[in-house]
Image (spheres, grey):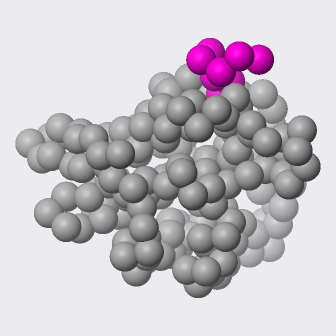
Amino acid sequence: MNSLLNLLNCTVEITKLTEKHWPEVRAIYESGLATGNANFSTQTRGWEEWDFAHLINCRLAAVENHVVLGWAALSATSDRCVYEGVAEVSVYIREDARGKGIGGGLLKTIVEESEKQGLWMLESRIFAENLASLTIHKRNGFRVVGRRERIGKMNGVWRDTILLERRSSKVGI
């Protein structure tokens, strides 16, 4: 699965994320964590743990001139069989590539890939302050289904998350 995004005078290839991308993927993830608005994690995992936690058929890297600019991946929300068609979305963009449409392109593509895999619902939990992420999710068919107030404490501060979901119109439910 390869596709191209034409953005601001550059061509970005969206390709399957593999272990060869891991050093850059990990650095992008760490950069996202440093913003304080990505998620509650404070550490990154190694490749083996990351690999185990993400669905093999729904991992994407946005690459320009052999440089990873961003990535998207899905992880199961539960190991119970009744939730087999539900996954959580992660999208991370390299700091110097943010605001160029790469996140929206990755999200659009991972939605398409999820439907090919028979997933019927994607969800995302986003910090209320992360307006860029909320915007690209809404533009890609996600809707707000709730706000989890004071769901977790980060650096001594209680944080809210917005819960969004996108139900597939292509997978019969």
Task: Identify which residue, 100 or 57, lies in the foreground.
Answer: 57
Direction from residue 34 to residue 150 in the image, left or right: right
Q: Report the quarter where the C terminus lies.
A: top right
Rendered location of residue 167, percent (x, y): 68, 24
Looking at the rendering, the stretch of residues picked out in magenta corresponds to: 166-173
- Examine the image and state in which quarter residue 159 appears: bottom right
Magenta span contains residue 170: yes
Rendered location of residue 71, percent (x, y): 43, 57
Rendered location of residue 64, percent (x, y): 19, 58
> Is residue 145 among the parts visible in the rendering?
yes
Point 82% across, 66% down: residue: 153
- Examine the image and state in which quarter residue 81 appears: top right
Magenta span contains residue 149: no
Point 36% across, 39% down: residue: 105
Point 53% across, 33% down: residue: 116
2 to 116, vertically: above or below: below
Task: Identify which residue, 165 or 157, lies in the foreground.
Answer: 165
Point 68% across, 66% down: residue: 53
Q: Report the quarter where the N terminus lies.
A: top left
Task: Identify which residue, 150 or 66, lies in the foreground.
Answer: 66
Direction from residue 120 to residue 62 in the image, left or right: left
- Examine the image and state in which quarter residue 119 appears: top right
